[in-house]
Amino acid sequence: MKENAKSKLKKTLQTEKDFKQVLDNNKALIIKIASVYFSNPDDRQDLVQEIAIQLWRSFPRYNSKYALSTWIYRIALNTSISYLRKQKTREKHMSKIAEENSVILWNEENHSTEYLKDLYRLIENLNPAEKALIILHLDSRSNREIASIMGISKSNVSTRLNRIKSKLKQLNQKK
């Protein structure tokens, strides 16, 4: 009986070690996704933590026949969209004064160029699904990978990306 408990403990410690390594290796990806959904550093940090929690909960069920990055993207994007919905519900209950006093803060280390700042400002105008598609595209993911991550067809990815690019061009011309 003691051997079984020791074996479980050893496996759990190994799983934690593996998970920490996965998080360390994919930290930039997670931060990038959180940055697309939230410009406020506190909200971004909360979302990063929520993504990490969801990844940990799903870690034992990871199927190695899929790329680890695909699995992380899928969980991170789904978590972001759910978190954003919850955030919007909370904001409905906030007073108008509190909403007007919120300030968009940028962490200059993560957004080092003016181009990236402008791009993130434009992306803020997209809906959650569009944000997910464009961040995957900007991260040089193939349409096949994007389709797998998003759970849509490859042709649907192409169509939506073209619409998103047009939308971003129009938004950029308005500014």
Image (tube, grey):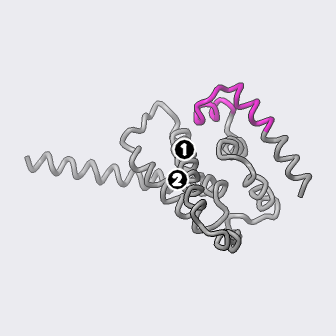
Residue shown at the point (57%, 51%) measured from the top left:
85
Mark 2 neighbour density, 10 Å: few (under 14) some (14–19) many (20 or more): few
Specify which label sits upstream in the sequence, 1 or 2: 2
Question: Magenta includes 175?
Answer: no
> Disc 2 marks which amino acid?
Asn
Measured Cα–Cα span from mark 1 to mark 2: 20 Å
Q: Secondary structure at mark 2?
A: helix
Which quarter of the figure has residue 116?
A: bottom right
User: Residue at 88% across / 47% down in the picture?
Assistant: 170
Q: Residue furthest left?
A: 1
* Location of residue 31 (image quadrant): bottom right
- How many marks the image carries: the answer is 2
Main SS class of the magenta portion in the image: helix
Task: Read off the residue under disc 1.
Answer: 78
Decide whether residue 160 is among the magenta residues.
Answer: yes
- Badge 1: residue crowd in 10 Å (few <14, some 14–19, many ≥20): some
- The x and y percentages for residue 142 are 68, 34
Percent x, y for residue 151?
Answer: 58, 31
Q: Which of the pair 16/103 is nearer the observer?
A: 103
6 on left or right of 31: left
Q: Secondary structure at mark 1?
A: helix
**As drawn, 163 above or below 131:** above
Asked if marks 1 and 2 touch (Cβ < 8 Å), the reply is no
Residue 25, numbered circle = 2
Quarter holding the C terminus is bottom right
Give the magenta-colored segment's residue range: 143-163
Q: What x and y, as percent, mark residue 153?
A: 65, 26
User: Would residue 115 be found to the left or right of residue 22 on screen?
Assistant: right
Residue 121 vs residue 32, the one in the foreground: 121
Residue at 69% in and 74% down: 101
Image position, residue 62 (x, y; %): 42, 38
